Amino acid sequence: MLADFDYFFAQCEELRNPSIKDKPVVVGVYSGRTEESGAVSTSNYVARKYGVKSGMPLFLAKRKLEGTDAVFFKVDHEYYDQISDRIMQIFRGYATSLEQVSIDEAYLDVSEQVEGSFEKAQDYGQKIKADVKAKVGISFSIGVGANKLVAKIACDSQKPDGLTIIRPEEAEAFLAPLAVDRLLGVGKKTTVRMEQMGIKTIGDLAKFDCQRLIEVFGKVMGIYFHNAANAMDNEPVAEQGEAESISRIGTLKQDTRNLDFILQKTDELTEYVFKDLTERNLSFKSVSIYVVLVDLSCKNRSVTFEQPAKDKETITKNVRTLFEKFLGESTLEIRRVGVKVSGFHKEELHQKQLTLFFQ
Ligand code: DCP
Ligand code: CA
Ligand code: CA
């Protein structure tokens, strides 16, 4: 099962400003050169009706939305990350394993929970959607298939708020009419090359002589293309290994060298780090700070203790000391700051994995 959040950054903005829901909403990355320069990160479906697309220059999006009551936002990664984390946490409760592939996308292995039944997967998908909607307020689309490849394409086929189930016996027919570039690994160059060979759709590719594909694309890719077109994929839903560190980064309201101002921000970040830490019941042996200066150079400083610690004060105290020292060494103003804890207790990590295993 693949879940992909709908028009994610723009939906997050709607969530905290419910009154803009029916207006075109555009989230942009401003390059800062002029007021107008930058690109569209994403937009809601109202804005998409006017032809706004991800990656489009902002001035063009503005032109397309001229005369409407469109609202523009600057990307706020911190906020989107927090929402994403909350949803991923809910997903964990529904899946045997979870593979997060991006801020707004994750594979859930739910085969056990639905006992291999695609019928049950339909209800199960609805249940997860309703739960996340109620708890976080975000909608997303789900694709269900016998493997990751089919789940992904199923999910893309119906957005927003979609729930698309492709049974194993339907998979080949479902893929056949789609353009080859819908397959992972088929980029512009490969699309052109395949077109020269008379392959336009996934169906064309599925029927194409596998030996010939190997001659043209090499053994690994040739076999992959052949299998993928035939809806065959054995990639497991791979849980990311237990993190080696927990960290948070944030942008300061203004560039500064004022210690209190900086610590106000790092205290906020420490709250999040500490929350993750306690949720996972880990102790740490290192505390680090991360600094982005006005010239955009990045610096790290860290301290490691003899004995592991578990409390918040150890983090705040050491972050303060590290910043005091850092400000003495550098003269530039600071733009972004981060807090990280690492050096987790190996037994604890191991113990956690065992408990998970036997649950
Ligand atoms: N994103 C970005 N720049 C791009 C594409 C995407 O910054 N060129 C960001 C903003 C998106 C997020 O990544 O909200 C997720 O990307 P998706 O491709 O999943 O697009 P959306 O979630 O915005 O829309 P959809 O409803 O089509 O999934
Ligand atoms: Ca999305
Ligand atoms: Ca996505």
Image (tube, rainbow, N blue to C red):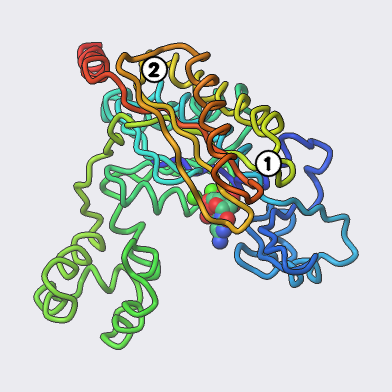
- Pointer 1 residue: 257
Amino acid carrying mark 1 in the image = Arg
Q: Is mark 1 on a helix, strand or loop?
A: loop
Position of residue 326 measured from the top left corner of the image (x, y, whole percent): 54, 39
Percent from the top left, x then y, of residue 79? 63, 37
Residue 159, can we see it?
A: no
Q: Residue furthest front?
A: 328
Left or right for 278, reference 190: right
> Which residue is found at the position 43% from the left and 19% from the top?
277
In front of the other: 321 or 49:
321
Name the N-terminal-most of marks 2 and 1.
Answer: 1
Verify CB contact (< 8 Å) between mark 2 and mark 1. no
Is the residue marked by circle 2 packed among few (<14), some (14-19), or many (20+) residues within 10 Å?
Answer: few
Relative vertical location of residue 163 with respect to residue 342 in this rendering, above or below: below
Vertically, is 97 above or below 161? Answer: above
Residue 285 visible (yes or no): yes
Expressed as whole percent of the image width and height from the top left, the position of residue 7 reads 61, 49
- The furthest residue to the bottom: 196
* Residue that label 2 marks: 280
**Quadrant position of residue 307:** top left
What SS does tag 2 mark?
Answer: loop
Q: How many labels does the image show?
A: 2
Along the line of sight, the residue nearer the viewer: 69 or 41: 41
At label 2, the amino acid type is Arg
The image shows residue 152, relative to residue 310, as above or below, that is below
The picture places residue 76, in percent across and down from the top left corner, at 66, 44
Judged left or right of residue 356, residue 275 is: right
